[in-house]
Image (cartoon, rainbow, N blue to C red):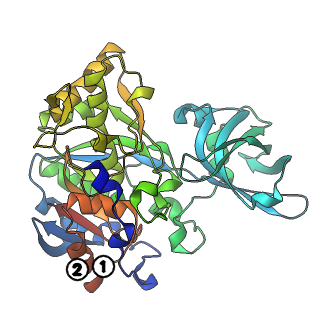
């Protein structure tokens, strides 16, 4: 299975997407988007606000509650050159929550726009926060470069002269929300609201988990009223989510690392629901499916550390599996429920309330889903890893969905319409 999956040709996952089909802005009412329904091979459509009518009562639905940060910052040199600093990942401190609470100094791994004009030295800008002047500087360290997060990232040290102001407040004051590059437009003030889910809470993403953009408080209430159990996890989406597959075969594509937080109650809810879930978005999918492989690591090594639990890109394909798709550990099949219980035991042993880990999982045809039984997702770019994920979920039947969407006036990509996929 590993070999076959690695040699998938990305050209087999192409389709013609005219620019006019890419939604440049969301609908005025987010829950009035169209909803494509794929149920056991049959395709139809409805409107998103009727979502509850298509879901089984009592099911578990899992959302990604990450919040997009205003990750783009601009500095102008004395020469007039404009430098863009795109925050990618906290470097010091590495914890997202601590990072946004920092006072006076912090460091990030960043992508740099117009890097050739910033060979060395410190950039600075002065602005007001709460009526008081603040001087912010940025210094690049070109000796610290990483290429593991979806691009070439540089270490940038920030400092400011008011220790009563947090870095979160600085971003709110001068940062710019990074909307997807394929929208081909500047960020507008409205994006600060429309490019966030109504349930976003935990700051850290540089791209929205866009399947969640269709939900409104009234839709969430309707789900509650019909007995859907809602739970949340956190996966901070990096810019690597937009990284195109440039290699002929997918084995040449490197997935970016994504950081996840899953609370004890989510693991308990999974056990209560036979380890089956409706995933809202591909980020929730990657987190939920990674949990099984984290549990498999603990089955093989009960003393595994947080770093050990990281799921590598091809790891799921390297195990031996039984005919039901369960991983074999020391010759014995590992059920999904046992993998989840291993994670709960891990939390108990370390007296933790939540699992903090990371994943690089690539889900492509040949992958056997363990937890996700239904998927709510938007329509993705041609030749993308997200399209591979959808194809794997639909057992290769993705073209039926995309042909229908293209021929029935569906809107595509981040601000576009939605789909409910039930294999």
Q: Position of residue 149 (x, y in %)?
A: 54, 47
Identify whether 115 is placed above or below 412. above
Image quadrant in which the C terminus is located: bottom left
Residue drawn 33% across and 47% down?
A: 286
Residue at which label 1 appears:
410
Residue at which label 2 appears:
404
Q: Position of residue 92 (x, y in %)?
A: 64, 32
Please indicate whether residue 78 sits to the left or right of residue 15 in the image: right
Per the model, the C-alpha gap separating discs 1 and 2 is: 8 Å
Tag 1 and tag 2, C-beta contact below 8 Å: yes
Q: Nearer the viewer, residue 215 or 319?
A: 319
Q: Position of residue 197 (x, y in %)?
A: 40, 55
Q: Quadrant of residue 47?
A: bottom left
Please indicate whether residue 406 sits to the left or right of residue 188 in the image: left
Residue drawn 22% across and 71% down?
A: 36
Q: What kind of element bears circle 2?
A: helix
Residue drawn 32% across and 14% down?
A: 349
Q: What kind of element bears circle 1?
A: loop
* Residue 151 can be seen, yes or no: yes
């Amino acid at each position: 299975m590993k070999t076959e999956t690695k040699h998938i040709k990305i050209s087999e996952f192409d389709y013609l997407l005219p620019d006019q089909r890419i939604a440049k802005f969301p609908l005025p009412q987010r829950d009035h988007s169209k909803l494509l329904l794929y149920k056991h091979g049959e395709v139809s459509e409805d409107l998103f606000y009727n979502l509850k009518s298509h879901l089984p009562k009592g099911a578990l639905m899992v959302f990604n509650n990450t919040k997009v940060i205003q990750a783009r910052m601009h500095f102008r040199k004395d020469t007039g050159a404009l430098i863009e600093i795109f925050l990618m990942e906290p470097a010091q401190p590495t914890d997202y929550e601590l990072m946004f609470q920092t006072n006076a100094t912090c460091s990030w791994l960043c992508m740099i726009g117009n890097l050739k004009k910033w060979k060395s030295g410190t950039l600075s800008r002065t602005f007001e926060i709460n009526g008081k002047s603040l001087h912010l500087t940025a210094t690049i360290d070109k000796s610290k470069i990483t290429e593991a997060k979806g691009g070439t990232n540089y270490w940038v040290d920030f400092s400011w002269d008011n220790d009563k102001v947090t870095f979160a407040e600085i971003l709110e004051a001068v940062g710019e929300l990074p909307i997807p590059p394929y929208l081909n437009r500047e960020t507008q003030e409205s994006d600060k609201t429309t490019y966030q889910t109504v349930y976003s809470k935990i700051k850290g993403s540089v791209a929205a988990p866009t399947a969640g953009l269709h939900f409104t408080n009234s839709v969430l209430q309707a789900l509650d009223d019909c007995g859907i159990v809602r739970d949340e996890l956190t996966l901070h989406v990096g810019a690597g989510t937009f990284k195109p597959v440039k290699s002929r075969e997918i084995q040449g594509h490197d997935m970016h690392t994504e950081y996840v937080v899953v609370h004890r109650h989510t693991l308990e809810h999974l056990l209560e629901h036979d380890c089956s879930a409706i995933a809202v978005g591909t980020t929730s999918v990657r987190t939920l499916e990674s949990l099984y492989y984290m549990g498999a690591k603990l089955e093989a090594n009960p003393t595994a550390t947080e770093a050990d639990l990281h799921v590598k890109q091809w790891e799921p394909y390297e195990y031996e599996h039984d005919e039901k798709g369960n991983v074999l550990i020391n010759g014995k099949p590992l059920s999904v429920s046992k993998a989840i219980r291993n994670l709960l035991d891990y939390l108990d042993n370390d007296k933790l309330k939540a699992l903090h880990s990371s994943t690089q999982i690539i889900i492509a045809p040949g992958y056997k889903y363990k937890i996700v039984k239904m998927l709510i997702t938007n329509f993705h770019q041609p030749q993308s890893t997200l399209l591979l994920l959808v194809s794997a979920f639909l057992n290769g039947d993705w073209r039926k969905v995309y042909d229908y969407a293209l021929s029935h006036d569906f809107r595509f990509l981040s601000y576009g319409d939605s789909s409910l996929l039930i294999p």
